[in-house]
Amino acid sequence: MKTFTRTLLSVGTALCLYGTAAQADTIKIALAGPATGPVAQYGDMQKVGVLAAIEQINKAGGVNGDMLESVIYDDACDPKQAVAVANKIVNDGVQYVVGHLCSSSTEPASDIYDEEGVLMITAASTSPSITEKGYGMIFRTIGLDSLQGPFAAQYIIDNVKPQNMAIIHDKQQYGEGLATAVKDAVEANGITPVMFEGVTAGDKDFSALIAKLKKNNVDFIYYGGYHPELGLILRQSAEKGLNAKFMGPEGVGNPDISKIAGEASEGLLVTLPQSFDQDPANQAIVEAIKAKNEDPSGAFVFPAYSAVQIMTEAMKGADSTDPEEVAEYIHNNTFDTTTGKLAFDEKGDLTEFSFVVYDWHADGTKTPAK
């Protein structure tokens, strides 16, 4: 493993530095995810949480007097770019990463981090395969598709009771994985989807898909993927007279879906982590985020905040900034965080995590579904 260094970032490296005194040493934490591209909004959520945590921890004295420093890397949620970013993080000597965000980017990046001794915590990637490889320094602060999919399916079975259900996905690791988990769970409970089909991420015209949904008299659609495509499907479905209810995962729970779909987004069902910004214990953090004209309500804000908390508390507990020692401490301890008391299993997954079903509204807000 490479020796951990505490140095100021070189000129030209994109960074955000909060409250670092000139004479203090720094501990660099990479923030890897989409700063550009169609799902950059989710990267913004992660960024808000990480930077808020770094600011608060530095104000409280940092880690044994050393300040935290964020280094921002853009992978655009593209697997090839994520590999390039992971290699750059290693070459830059950064040994702690919050990210990546899209599962299809996180998985290949995690291979590099494991080989190079970098500790990574993703606050957003939900594909089970990421942590099934037995890597000792890969963690996540969000639940798995294997939890979210069956959870959504149970809500469909108990509350929706569709007559003709379709499942659509975007052919990507995250979206197809969730769609498959939902399909397996509803079929195990006697519901056989009349359609299970993929669309291509980036497509704009879904006329053929909608015609097929209408032909099959579909009254309920589960969508696995991100908001840009579902927003267009919702809008075009309304325009073409498809009378069906839709449901999607946290990847569609973004106010921009309402900007795309307009009134057609009203009543969309979304599974999301609970609204940690509504927790009274987090209100000081919420106000600090709002004071910067940023939104504390995004699904990944507080899971990202917690990722930084866990890293730094483990550094203190292990009395070390060596990633292997810090990872061992994470595996063997429980952490009080903004998203609750967290502990990890041997794979780096949370031992407990809860999703909530929300009704989405055309104004971009949400309320718990009944």
Image (cartoon, grey):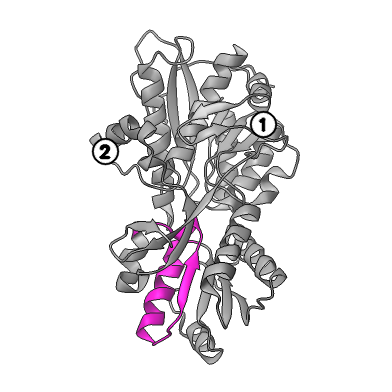
Nearest to viewer (mark 1 / mark 2):
2
Q: Decide if residue 162 is on the left or right side of residue 48.
A: right
> Dot 1, crowdedness within 10 Å: few (<14), some or many (≥20)?
many
Rendering quarter of residue 171: bottom right
The residue at which mark 1 appears reads as: 137
Q: Which mark is residue 290?
A: 2
Residue found 68% across the figure and 24% down from its top = 332
Q: Nearer the viewer, residue 287 or 304?
A: 287
Q: Is residue 135 left or right of residue 75?
A: right
The image position of residue 323, as x and y in percent, is 63, 22
As drawn, the label of residue 264 is none
Q: Examine the rendering and report whether any part of residue 232 can be seen.
A: yes
Can residue 169 be seen in the rendering of this structure?
A: no
Q: Residue at x 51, y 59 (%)?
A: 249
The mark tally for this picture is 2
Question: Residues in magenta?
Answer: 226-255
- In the picture, the quarter occupied by the N terminus is top right
Residue 309 lies within the magenta run: no
Furthest toward the right, the residue is 134
Mark 1 or mark 2, which has the lower sequence index? Answer: 1
Q: Residues within 10 Å of mark 2 (few under 14, many from 20)?
A: few
- Identify the amino acid type marked 1: Met
For the C terminus, the image quarter is bottom left
Residue visible at 42% across and 30% down? 13
Check disc 2 and give the amino acid type: Lys
Disc 1 to disc 2, how far (Cα)? 33 Å
Horizontal side of residue 59 vs 164, given as left or right: left
Viewer-closest of 39 and 365: 365
Looking at the image, the residue that sits furthest to the bottom is 215
